[in-house]
Amino acid sequence: MQHTAYYSPIGSSDLESDPIFNVVIAYEDFETGKQAKETYDFLVNNLRQECRFENQMWKFDVLGIPKLRDMAAKDALVADIIIISCHGTHDLSADVKAWMNAWVQGQSNAIALVALFGDASDDRENKANRDYLAGIARCAGMEFFAQPNDLAVKTLRRIYYIGPSG
């Protein structure tokens, strides 16, 4: 007796054919925003065959406005990757930390927190920021990567293969 198993093919409507990969970027100023956007663009250019990308960019200054900080926290809650881009030469502001605490407490779905330090080539200059951000990532249950921009793009390529939640 021969048994034949039949598996119906999964239709295109059963699987999302164009998943969305959400990236939230918080940046200190124009220079660090440009650095983060270049990293994001690298991701898009190298991985656009795999999914569709969306991003939201938030300047540190606007995180001082409670309603905008709440909006930025909501964006971070649905992000796949959160990128923090700063010079790394001074501590993060209380407003930026309040924004991060909001999405950590809201249980962000992000798989990684990436820190880009533009000016800080010496680890001692940004150790406090790295330690703080590593703690945030640990509390949120996500991967943490902190590198100068030229290495971060390689890290982001690796992060993508963990998988988008979209």
Image (tube, rainbow, N blue to C red):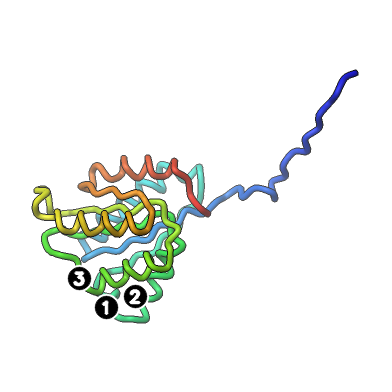
Estimate the spatial distance between the alpha carbons at disc 2 and disc 3, rounded to whole Å.
13 Å
Residue extending furthest toward the top: 1
Decide if residue 119 is on the left or right side of residue 1.
left
Name the side, left or right, on which 7 lies relative to 109.
right
- Disc 1 and disc 2: Cα gap in Å? 7 Å
Q: Disc 3 on helix, strand or loop?
A: loop
Q: Earlier in the sequence, mark 1 or mark 2?
A: 1
**Which circle marks residue 69 in the picture?**
2
- Within 10 angstroms of label 1, few (less than 14), some, or many (20 or more) residues? some
Density class for disc 2 (Cα within 10 Å; few <14, some 14-19, many ≥20) is many
Which image quarter holds the N terminus?
top right
Q: What residue type is labelled 1?
A: Gly
Tell me: 27 left or right of 8: left
Is the Cβ of the residue at disc 2 closer than 8 Å to that at disc 3? no
> Where 63 falls versus 122 (above or below)?
below
The image position of residue 85, as x and y in percent, is 25, 58
Q: What residue is shown at x 43% (from left), y 55% (from top)?
A: 80
Q: Residues within 10 Å of mark 3 (few under 14, many from 20)?
A: few
Q: Which residue is drawn at 26% across and 61% down?
A: 33
**Residue 64 — which label?**
1
Expressed as whole percent of the image width and height from the top left, the position of residue 127 reads 14, 54
Which kind of residue does numbered mark 3 sit on? Answer: Ser
Label 2: which secondary element:
helix
**Dot 2 or dot 3, earlier in sequence:** 2
Secondary-structure class at tag 1: helix
The amino acid on which the numbered mark 2 sits, given as a three-letter code, is: Arg
CB-based contact (under 8 Å), mark 1 and mark 3: yes
> Between 77 and 36, which is closer to the camera in this rendering?
77
Determine which residue is flagged by label 3: 93
